[in-house]
Image (cartoon, rainbow, N blue to C red):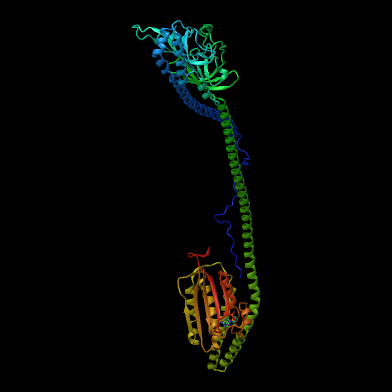
Amino acid sequence: MLEETAMDASRPGMATQPPTANAAPETSPPKAVVALVLGLLPLILWQAAMWSERIAAQAIRDDGWRRLALYTANLSSELEHYDYLPRILAEDTAIKEVLLDPGDATAVDVANRYLARINTFAGASATYVIMRDGTTLVASNWETERSFIGANLRFRPYFQTAFKGEMGRYFALGTTSLEPGYYLARPVLQDFDTDRKIIGVIVVKVGMNRLEEHWGNGPVQVMVTDDYGVVFITSNKDWKFRTLSRLDDKTREIITTSRQYHNAPLNPLGIETKETMAEGVRIVAFENGARYMMLGAGIPNTDWRLQVLMPYARVGRIVWAAVALAGFAFAVLALVAYSLFQHRQRLRDRLTHQQEIAGTLAAARDELEKRVAERTADLRTAQAELVQAAKLAMLGKLSTGINHELNQPLSAIRSYADNAQAFLDRGRTEEAKGNLASISELTARAGAIVTRLKGFARKSKDDVRAVPIALSVANAITLLGPRFRSEGIEVVSDLGGRDILVCGGAVRLEQVFVNLFANAADAMAGSPVKVLSVTLDESEDEVTIRVADSGPGIDTGVLERLFEPFFTTKEAGEGLGIGLAISYGIVTHFGGTIEAANHHKGGGVFSVRLKKAENGGCGDGS
Ligand code: ADP
């Protein structure tokens, strides 16, 4: 019989509701975020510019300070280098003597040659002696065309300072040579005079070309200015004898009188201060647009200032590079962020899509399960009707069978009864008794026939519950015990665990085994060895009971039709052919199977397989 189990429409773990679809997925970042990011860009670029300018300016300033210290030291050492010379010459007896007797031509000549030699040794530009009236008496360049001899230099500030008894230091263009130089002047004192009267002035002129040449290579510029702000030593020829700021007329007159810079126009350089960064550090722009960072420091023992000018244009280039770099980094970051956003959006879209598909699938599955459930219910009804119809059809056949089966005992009963009546009429009570006994026997036989039909006619109910299978089998063995003993049948049973529960009905399972045992006993009727073996095997979810006999076995033709209703090989009156059909119906109704075969020793073997009751229950029946 066909049994179907309705599919469970509400399986756990399966989404039955399609997920609520999200709001339309966005394909680009929110406008507010874009606006914020774009708004940040100028701020970031501005910050990058400020930061890079500060760093670059700092680096330039540090370099500037280093150079300033170096150049100042250069200049100071260059100036001090010749300090000793006027000091020594001022003490020279020959110089003093010639000053005391300027008319001695021989002494002057000797002194001239002497100074020329000293001047060459010292590497100075010129060395000369000036008398009290300012006239040059002796000079190292006495032989040259531009000899200082005879020139009156009393207007020179260095002469005036020395004449006051101090060390005169002065930078100027030579009045005769027009060559720029640093003048060091000292008074020459009369030795034996108690007042130590100044009898003349010794002057050493030192050229500054070496320093200028030394400073002149490279983009960094240097200038040395005097106390009026006139540039007199510089690495840049164009700046020479120009001024830091416009000179007033009075200053101009003083300079002109001293002929310090001869006829130089002393035009201002036109430097404009753009920014003062710190004490002595400013950003300046020249008329031609060139920008420098200007760092200055005073030269010890002088009124001079040394200025280092560091080119500032590269700061602009560094700032532009930093801004470009920041812009590029910003663009790269923005692109990365955008692609990450898009990637996330795509993932989200895919997820939504998958959820939609899952929702659709769940809905389709629900629909399918609903239909299956409906069809199963229909089939159950149809099947029940079919079974009932089949049973009715069988009933027709059965009536014929019963008719045939019961007719014989009934007509025998009638003839026994008729004869008994005749025997009684004739007073032959013993014979009448015998007939009555035969009638009783025949009635019992008819009753047995009817009883066997009972189980077949009953409509099966869904009374499936957990029953101990070993007990049903043992009961069946007990029921047939008297027959086994009277026919000499040995029963070998191994039922194993007696507490195994299967899905079924206890009485109906008993009925199945009684039927199988009775068939086995029938089969072994003519066998010399009569052994009935009953074994029980269990697997994870099934129990199998094997009923084997030592009879002749089952013919192939018989095997095929064994479970057909009313199929029998037995003599009329011996079998109805419904025992196995009923057993089949019962076992399949319980969700089990029944199979027949011949075992290797030749006898028949019937295997009944039943479902184990899971956790002591059989679905809704127990
Ligand atoms: P019945 O016993 O009334 O004939 P069953 O449906 O019980 O009806 O059996 C049908 C037939 O199956 C039997 O007539 C017999 O030929 C065969 N059969 C059943 N059991 C055995 C067995 N153990 N050995 C050989 N044949 C068997």
Q: Identify the residue at image location x=49%, y=27%.
A: 63
Q: Quadrant of ligand 1?
A: bottom right
Between 234 and 148, the residue placed more toward the observer is 148
Q: Report how many numbered discs are placed on residues in the image.
A: 0
- Residue furthest out toward the front: 106
Q: Is residue 411 above or below residue 74?
A: below
Vertical order, 310 against 263 (above or below): below
Foreground: 580 or 41? 41
Lateral position of residue 229 relative to residue 558, left or right? left
Q: Is residue 505 above or below residue 433?
A: above
Q: Position of residue 13 (x, y in %)?
A: 55, 54
Q: Measuring from the top left, give residue 577's x and y in whole percent.
A: 61, 80
Question: In percent of the image, x 39 and y 14: which residue is there?
Answer: 92
Q: Residue furthest top?
A: 133
Whether residue 436 is situated above or below residue 190 in the rendered picture: below
- Can you see residue 166? no
Q: Which quadrant would the N terminus be assigned to in this image? A: bottom right
Where's residue 236, x and y in %? 56, 21
Q: Nearer the viewer, residue 424 or 434?
A: 434
- The image quadrant of residue 327 is top right
Q: Residue at x 46, y 75 (%)?
A: 496
Residue 224 seen in render: yes
Say which quarter of the image contains residue 268.
Answer: top right
**Horizontal and vertical percent for residue 563?**
61, 77
